[in-house]
């Protein structure tokens, strides 16, 4: 077994200070993901209310700020029902996979540059995997199983139909998403999310160089998160409730909550890949110290992310849902060909700029 | 540090692979197969083959097995409808599988293990895989791409509705 030893880069965890920092950072990112997702549910209702000229939740605490807590308590207090003829282990596994995959993606996102504490530099990034973007795709592609397993284990035809619809949609849009990313990777020349963010310093945002790819990626992110106009997974008028018809209590809560975490992470990825991440113009000309600059960058990154979360909500309460055949036609006959053309054009431009013709 | 992880992963791989065969419900078999793919991806990661790890999960666990699961969920296979084979067929199956296992065991036992320091060379990283694939193995790569394209066109042709022909 000699060849297996020392294959993994254990060296990065050699000193305990780094290890402790990483562990604290992992817990912090986990906590922030949950907190943002929690308040996304509140924001969603407030945005919906605003767009529909209502007030929205305003009873729990000032401005209804405690509403997510009240919702959480309600979810936990509900009766837990596992259908008699269901596959019990898989019935529980379904929401677990959803939560797990939703929380796993945040690992490769660079939340900020680096903090210098006691003369040591700590990067605000959990791990810079060599295949960062592919890792994101791997995790996203596993997320489908949460829906499929949950829908099948319920032993209910509406759940099964809902889960098949949802997973077929996610698999279809994963392709277009992958193709839109290929063009970005070709232009950037790296799969590491951190390096992609670093290349966008100043106002060199990828959104300006890859406008088509950016649009495709955002559309596919909507579809992957099962958000309107692609929320056919939970089309109440046709499917009772979709894949989570049989779920109750916190298991249902996890399915719904995972959607909000996925939305937060998707927004963060959109902001990092196409909108400069923690970079903002003229950062170097402000003459701030490194740490202040980093903290400002983190805030900027969260502001960008929040904007995209708002975009998700804005679209949800503006655009009606697609019909299923329209959804599939859009995915396979419009987005994928457009993405391939985008890859082709990007390749030609790269060759032309390097004088390889 | 690495060796215990390897043993745990190896045990999990073998357990999942056995459960694929032993599990009574077809859906459980598929899920164990997916778990088996994950443990194999873990082995790739232990060898520092990060690209292979990611692609293995995306392609096998994320795409091919989803389609498997689709088909098996829709077939609605029950224990009652499962075809029962005769005793002779079962004995023949077990003995053939056993013999195959023996041959494989013999082959692996006499094989010379390749010792490669994967951590230093970065063999499994994307850059290296890409350079190898597009320089040394350009021709086989393009030919297999053509093969996939042919298969895709064939699938589209077969999947089209009959009404369009007449």
Image (tube, helix red, strand yellow):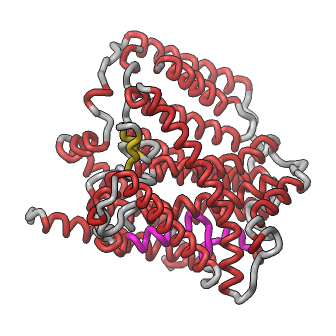
Most foreground residue, B58 or A255: A255
- Where is residue A336? Give x, y as percent: 42, 69
Q: Is residue A339 above or below residue B107?
A: below
- Where is residue A91? Give x, y as percent: 77, 47
Q: Is residue B103 above or below residue A355?
A: above
Residue placed at 42% from the left, 60% from the top? A296
Residue placed at 75% from the left, 63% from the top? A68
Q: Is residue A243 visible?
A: yes
- Where is residue B56? Give x, y as percent: 45, 42
Does A229 appear in magenta? Answer: yes
Q: Is residue B51 visible?
A: no
- Where is residue A27? Give x, y as percent: 59, 43
Q: Is residue A318 left or right of residue A186?
A: right
Main SS of the magenta segment? helix
Residue placed at 43% from the left, 39% from the top? B53
Most foreground residue, B21 or B83: B21
Most foreground residue, A310 or B67: A310
Q: Is residue A338 left or right of residue A91?
A: left
Does A275 appear in magenta? Answer: no
How many numbered marks, from 0 up? Answer: 0
Q: Which of the 4 quarters of the picture holds residue A23? A: top right
Q: Give the residues drawn in magenta, as a range.
A: A214-235
Residue placed at 79% from the left, 58% from the top? A72
């Amino acid at each position: 077994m000699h060849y297996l030893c020392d294959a993994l880069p254990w060296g990065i965890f050699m000193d305990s200070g780094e290890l402790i920092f990483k562990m604290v950072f992992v817990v912090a990112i986990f906590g922030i993901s949950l907190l943002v997702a929690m308040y996304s549910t509140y924001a969603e209702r407030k945005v919906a209310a605003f767009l529909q000229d209502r007030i929205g939740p305003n009873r729990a605490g000032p401005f209804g700020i405690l509403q997510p807590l009240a919702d959480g308590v309600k979810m936990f207090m509900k009766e837990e029902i596992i259908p008699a003829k269901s596959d019990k282990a898989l019935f529980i596994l379904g929401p677990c996979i959803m939560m797990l995959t939703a929380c796993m993606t945040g690992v490769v996102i660079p939340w900020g540059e680096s903090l210098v504490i006691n003369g040591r530099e700590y990067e605000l990034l959990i791990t810079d995997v060599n295949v960062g973007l592919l890792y994101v795709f791997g995790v996203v592609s596993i997320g489908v199983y949460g829906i499929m397993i949950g829908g099948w284990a319920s032993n209910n035809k509406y759940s099964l139909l809902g889960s098949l619809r949802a997973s077929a949609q996610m698999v279809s849009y994963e392709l277009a998403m992958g193709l839109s990313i290929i063009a970005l990777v070709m232009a950037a020349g790296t799969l590491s999310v951190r390096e992609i963010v670093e290349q966008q310093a100043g106002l060199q945002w990828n959104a300006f160089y890859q406008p088509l790819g950016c649009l495709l990626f955002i559309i596919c992110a909507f579809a992957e998160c099962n958000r309107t106009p692609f929320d056919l997974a939970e089309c109440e008028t046709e499917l009772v409730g979709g894949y989570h018809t049989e779920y109750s209590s916190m298991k249902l809560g996890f399915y719904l909550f995972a959607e909000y975490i996925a939305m937060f992470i998707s927004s963060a990825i959109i902001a990092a890949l196409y909108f400069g991440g923690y970079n903002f113009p003229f950062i170097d000309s402000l003459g701030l110290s490194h740490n202040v600059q980093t903290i400002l960058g983190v805030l900027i990154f969260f502001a960008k992310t929040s904007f995209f979360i708002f975009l998700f909500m804005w679209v949800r309460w503006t655009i009606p849902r697609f019909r299923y055949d329209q959804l599939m036609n859009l995915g396979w006959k419009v987005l994928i060909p457009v993405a391939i053309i985008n890859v082709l054009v990007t390749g030609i431009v790269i060759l032309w700029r390097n004088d390889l013709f | 540090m690495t060796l215990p992880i390897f043993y745990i992963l190896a045990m999990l791989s073998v357990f999942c692979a056995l459960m694929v065969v032993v599990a009574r419900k077809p859906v459980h078999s598929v899920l164990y197969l997916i778990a088996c793919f994950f443990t194999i991806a873990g082995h790739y990661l232990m060898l520092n083959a990060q690209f292979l790890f990611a692609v293995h999960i995306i392609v096998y666990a994320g795409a091919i097995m989803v389609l498997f699961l689709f088909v098996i969920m829709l077939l609605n296979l029950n224990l009652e409808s499962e075809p029962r084979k005769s005793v002779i067929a079962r004995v023949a199956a077990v003995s053939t599988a056993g013999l195959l296992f023996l041959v494989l065991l013999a082959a692996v036992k006499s094989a010379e293990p390749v010792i490669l320091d994967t951590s230093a060379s970065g063999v499994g990283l994307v850059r290296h895989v890409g350079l190898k694939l597009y320089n040394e193995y350009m021709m086989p790569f393009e030919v297999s791409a053509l093969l996939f394209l042919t298969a895709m066109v064939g699938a589209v042709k077969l999947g089209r509705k009959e009404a369009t022909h007449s």
